[in-house]
Image: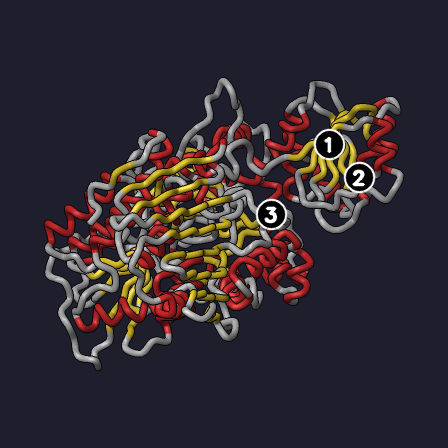
Amino acid sequence: MKQVVQNYKSGELAVLDVPVPGCKPGGVLVRSAYSLISTGTELMKVSEAGMSMLGKARSRPDQVAKVMQSVATNGVPATYRKVMGKLDSYTPLGYSLCGVVEQVGTGIDDVKVGDLVACAGNEHALHAELNWVPKNLYTPVPDGLAPRHAAFGTVGSIAMQGVRQGEPQLGEVALVIGLGLIGQLVVQLLAAAGVRVVGADPDPVRCELAERLGAAACGDPASAAVEAAVAELTDGHGVDQVYLAAGGGSNQPVELAARLCRDRGRVVDIGKCRLDLPWNAYYEKELDVRFSRSYGPGRYDPEYELEGRDYPIGYVRWTERRNLACFLDLVARGSVDVEPLVSHIADFDDAVETYQRLKDGELKAVAVLFRYPEQKEEAGEAQAPAVAVPAVKRPTGGAPTPARSAKTPVRLAFVGAGNYATSMLLPHLAQRDGVELSTVVTTTALSAANAQRKFGFAEATTDLDAVLGDKSIDAVFVVTRHSSHAELTRKALLAGKTVFVEKPLALTEDELAGVLAAVEESGNDRLQVGFNRRFAPLLQEARKRFGARTGPASLRYLVNAGRLGQGSWYLQQGTEGSRFAGEGGHFVDTASWLLEADPVSVYAVATSGNEDLQVVLRYPDGSTATISYVTTGAAGFPKETLDLIADGKVLRLDDFVRASVFVDGGVGRKRWASSRLPKARDKGQSAELAAFIKAVRTGGPMPVPLESLVATTSATLAVQAGLVGGAPVTLARAR
């Protein structure tokens, strides 16, 4: 299928061939009929992409702060790879469309194949021939409403949420500053609610359009016309509400709002404009400044948007989805007219040219629609799907891949191509001799296409079963979200593949049992979990220098994990498990490797709110390891520090950039320290991948025994049980 994309680094726009997205549970696959270009938001993004790197940094200071924090935590080289990987990727455009349901995922019963739906979301309602859309981001289109009009649903919801934030009352007067697409819709919604509206925009064409659509008067904000109209309609008191629907760097909108608003009036920010509030003006009138968050309640909440968990109507009357349905109803009943807003309809194949004309100012438009193939221009009706979704192929079981000739490349498939895969794994594999990147599988089409372009995969697809059934693929990397690791690993093992799964292997004991059942059923135990720290060259050398020990050891491991940013999927504990369950295996595995045994018991305590954890592991020879996993520390402090103490010796690791070993001798103290800082924090990914590829090629033992992987996973999972029970947890699987 085709999709409109942009490279944020170079500014390049393209219509790209990408795989068809998979139809996941909890949503529907929609074939686009019309999608709407947001001439404000999207053109701002397109313009930013054309800036220099310095210009991009100035426009997004929030992202610069994140980069600086990443440098402090991960070092310059790793941060550079991550940032450039993100910048030099194709990103999607679009967030408002109408289309036909082509496939229905499990758990969906409110629509069926062939239904017309309006869709929202900058990750789901893209300018693409097919989109997977979760339940709370689509709604059925009312009978008789033209698809090109239903494509306005998302921007209509944005305007509607802004109006709701203003709480307009019958007979009030409102000022709308900025008469672009959102502003025009706000004018109509206010007029439909019995509010008299004054519009302000420097474009006389837009002012004339707003007056035709219900505004009482409109004019240039720099002229006296707007102020005169407000004075006449309000008897000099000022408007009851001001809606800021303008963009740009001028502070004029907020200054005009203060001047024309009545005492204790309301100012609602809908657009992205400068907000240097003149303190005296806003203080003296005690103005109520409000923000309107996109489509409505539910926006940016992954449980609502992705998991389909609706808010009870008694507590949240107007959610994203209800706003979407309400707006379509108003259009269907004629209370809002979007047809006059349509400045241009372009064929989808002409998308790049259309964006360029808009950017250059050649095409003056309020709203532009993309019309997709097979749409009737006159009737505006979506047609039946023209291309079937690829057939599902079931995986076939079989024995693990045998040893091969050194000249035969090891063929790899990746399931998932997110940040970790593209910054920490694939760069090490793409240039490795004897490795062929065969297929990348993702649930979203564009991430697969990006990985194929950057790393040279032979194929990109969203069809997992076809990959598992491909006997020419030797090993499968599972690098998806945590909740899917165990099931994907189980399927790949049953298909006879050697499997590399990023941590964690499982989030529950039942998931772990399912993986082990697959090993038993298939006879395939060729499994590696991405516990990479034991492969770190600096730590390997330090352990060698530390030498053998005769007595029990004490190990202290401080992990200064830091707080997660709002919106991180790591915070979705209902589906993705606790944060420690997700990454704690790294630290348990490192401790067990240094102590050369698997733990026999786990004791865990936490501070109030479970923000900071203390995990004590006990080992068969009496050794102990204490892992302090904290999120409340200073961001500038190193992320990982470790001390191993035994037999008069101390091993010290400082965040994988420095290591020391102290040894008491007969004469005095001997010390070894790394002679120089490594070029980057090498946490062992490259060496781990080399060991894995060698095992696949030769058919030899896996880098880490399965028993150790299971023991580490069980110990990590036991932490939660220990927190609940308040007592040590004995590990039945320990060796």
Measured as percent of width and height from the top left, residue 701 is found at 18, 65
| Earlier-in-chain disc, 1 versus 3 | 1
Q: Residue 277 carries which label?
A: 2
Identify the residue at horizontal 33%, vertical 59% (top origin). 594
Q: Is residue 331 above or below residue 567?
A: above
Q: Which mark is residue 229?
A: none
Say what secondary structure mark 1 lies in.
strand
Measured as percent of width and height from the top left, residue 428 is found at 38, 70
Q: Residue 546's image quarter? A: bottom left
| Earlier-in-chain disc, 2 versus 3 | 2
- The answer to the question of whether label 2 and label 1 lie on touching residues, with beta carbons closer than 8 A, is yes
**Distance from the alpha carbon under mark 1 to that under mark 3:** 28 Å
Mark 2: few/some/many CA within 10 Å (<14, 14-19, 20+): some
Q: Which mark is residue 367?
A: 3
Q: Please indicate, yes or no, whether residue 21 appears anywhere in the rendered image.
A: no
- The answer to the question of whether label 2 and label 3 lie on touching residues, with beta carbons closer than 8 A, is no
State the count of labels.
3
Q: Residue 289 carries which label?
A: 1
Say what secondary structure mark 3 lies in.
strand
Q: In which quarter of the image is the N terminus?
A: bottom left
Name which residue type carries label 1. Val
Mark 3: few/some/many CA within 10 Å (<14, 14-19, 20+): many
